[in-house]
Image (cartoon, rainbow, N blue to C red):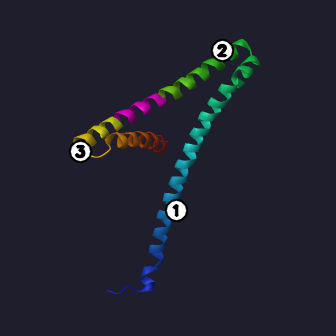
Amino acid sequence: TEVSLSELLSLDKVMTVLKEGIGSALSGLSKVASNGFLVLLFLIFLIPGASGTFSTLEKSMSKSNARKFRKALFDIEDSIYNYLKGKTLISAVSASASGLVLVLFGAKYPVLFALLFFFLNFILNNFYNL
């Protein structure tokens, strides 16, 4: 069964491979971009909050606008906190179940692998669910 070079390099096959490659590259790029946006959003609220920038902005507003601004910031911070708390809980339960299965099967270093499961599950869930 000899395969000629022209069969290997047929235009249809080359185009199919290119489409699949470009599609997966764009998909990966969009995931990285959305993850970067989430990190940027976290930083927007974490860094200025630590340095007092929000309180300076609040002082420059009227009392009713400052109250609305403070409530919006509190709601955003509360949502971020609840999101991270839920993801941490899900990752901890998943890692505990994985560790238990490893112990039941007699695997070496089940605690180490359970910790690895926790961190990888936490990171990958946050990255791929965006």
| Residue type pointed to by label 3 | Gly
Q: Residue at x 56, y 25 (%)?
A: 77
Check disc 1 and report its element: helix, strand or loop: helix
- What label does residue 84 carry, if any? none
Q: Considering only order in the chain, which callout, 1 or 3, is on the residue closer to the N terminus?
A: 1
What percent of the width, then of the height, locates residue 52? 70, 23
Residue at numbered disc 3: 106
Q: Is residue 86 rendered magenta in the image?
A: yes
What percent of the width, then of the height, locates residue 26? 53, 56
Check disc 3 and report its element: helix, strand or loop: loop
Q: Considering only order in the chain, which callout, 2 or 3, is on the residue closer to the N terminus?
A: 2
Q: Considering only order in the chain, which callout, 1 or 2, is on the residue closer to the N terminus?
A: 1
State the CA–CA distance, disc 3 to disc 1.
44 Å
Nearer to me, 58 or 22: 58
Q: Are marks 3 and 1 in contact (CB under 8 Å)?
A: no
Classify 86 as above or below 32.
Answer: above
Residue at numbered disc 1: 22
Nearer to me, 122 or 13: 122
State the CA–CA distance, disc 3 to disc 2.
58 Å
Q: Residue at x 46, y 45 (%)?
A: 128
